[in-house]
Image: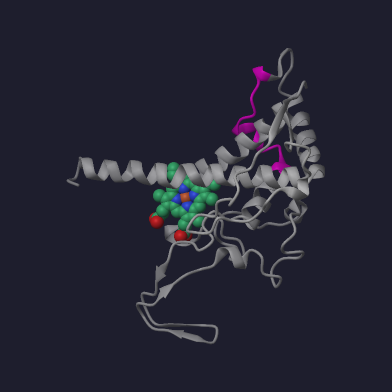
Amino acid sequence: MDEEHLTTTEIKGMILDLFGGGVHTSSATLEWAMAELLRHPECMRRLQTEVDTVMSQHCNGVNSVDDVLVDDDHIQQMPYLQSIVKEVMRLHPILPLIFPRVASTSFNLGKYQLPAGTNVLVNAWAIARDPRYWDRPTEFWPERFSKSDIDFSGQHYQYLPFGAGRRMCPGIRLGLSVVHVTLANLVRHFDWGIPDGKSAKDIDMSCKGGIGNSRAVPLLAIPKRRIC
Ligand code: HEM
């Protein structure tokens, strides 16, 4: 790069970063969220009530539910939605091992002495389910966040869905916006069911493995139009 221009290679690299980092992360998080909500209908109902209540204040004189979509401004008034997204990202972080770090100097970590140059892998998935830091660690329980100050900033080391430090996710604002707004609109406009008379317990919650924490079995859910 000279002082004023990016090269074609640099532009291609940036586009690759944006698509590579921005698409699967949000869509996979949404798929986990819908799976958890289908398995926990009481959370789905509470969320729909919250979204309906907030949106009813913004629909004065509007006839159709489709005329006003949930957007970023509405999300601030939806604390339960925010707790659900936090809980989904706790149980299903999209990068279970955040990107590796290299120790720039020697240091001690607990009982271990790490020489400079050591590759350090942080297992954000395991930390987010560690019973030393979380009550009922494997349970989907969004209410745990209602009175907690834990957020996505990477300052609470028991919770790292966007990583931490200088290399933490630069797309955090866009990612959070896409997940919150899409989820709120999905539950506002549709009731969701499971196909073929199966029950919520039949939803397979295993992960595919690999670098990104995708579902092993894609979620199949049936939308039914809601008339609000
Ligand atoms: C729900 C959505 C998202 C989640 C959960 C997520 C999660 C993460 C995590 C855990 C990291 C590693 C951070 C670390 O090692 O400390 C990361 C890095 C990154 N993310 Fe995201 N991300 C999301 C959305 C996005 C979006 C929308 C973009 C871009 C438009 C993006 C671009 C990137 C890039 C470029 C990096 C590499 C940063 C670096 O190495 O310096 N991400 N993301």
Residue 136 image point, x, y percent: 77, 64
* Image quadrant where one finds the C terminus: top right
Q: Is residue 64 above or below residue 22?
A: above
Residue 33 image point, x, y percent: 66, 45
Is any atom of residue 70 visible in this view? Answer: yes
Furthest residue in direction left, as rendered:
2
Q: Is residue 49 left or right of residue 92?
A: right
Q: Is residue 211 left or right of residue 12?
A: right
Q: Is residue 72 left or right of residue 188?
A: left
Number of marks in picture: 0
Which residue sits at x=47%, y=58%? 211
Check residue 69 for magenta coloring.
Answer: yes
Q: Is residue 116 left or right of residue 82?
A: left
Which residue sits at x=55%, y=51%? 214
Q: Is residue 207 above or below residue 185?
A: below
Furthest residue in direction right, as rendered:
42
Chain part drawn in magenta: 66-82
Residue 36 image point, x, y percent: 71, 47
Which residue sits at x=68%, y=57%? 149
**Image color mode:** one colour
Q: Is residue 181 above or below residue 113?
A: above
Furthest residue in direction front, as rendered:
196
Which residue sits at x=54%, y=43%? 26
Residue 135 image point, x, y percent: 76, 65
Q: Quadrant of residue 221?
A: top right
Q: Quadrant of residue 123?
A: bottom right
Check residue 84 for magenta coloring.
Answer: no
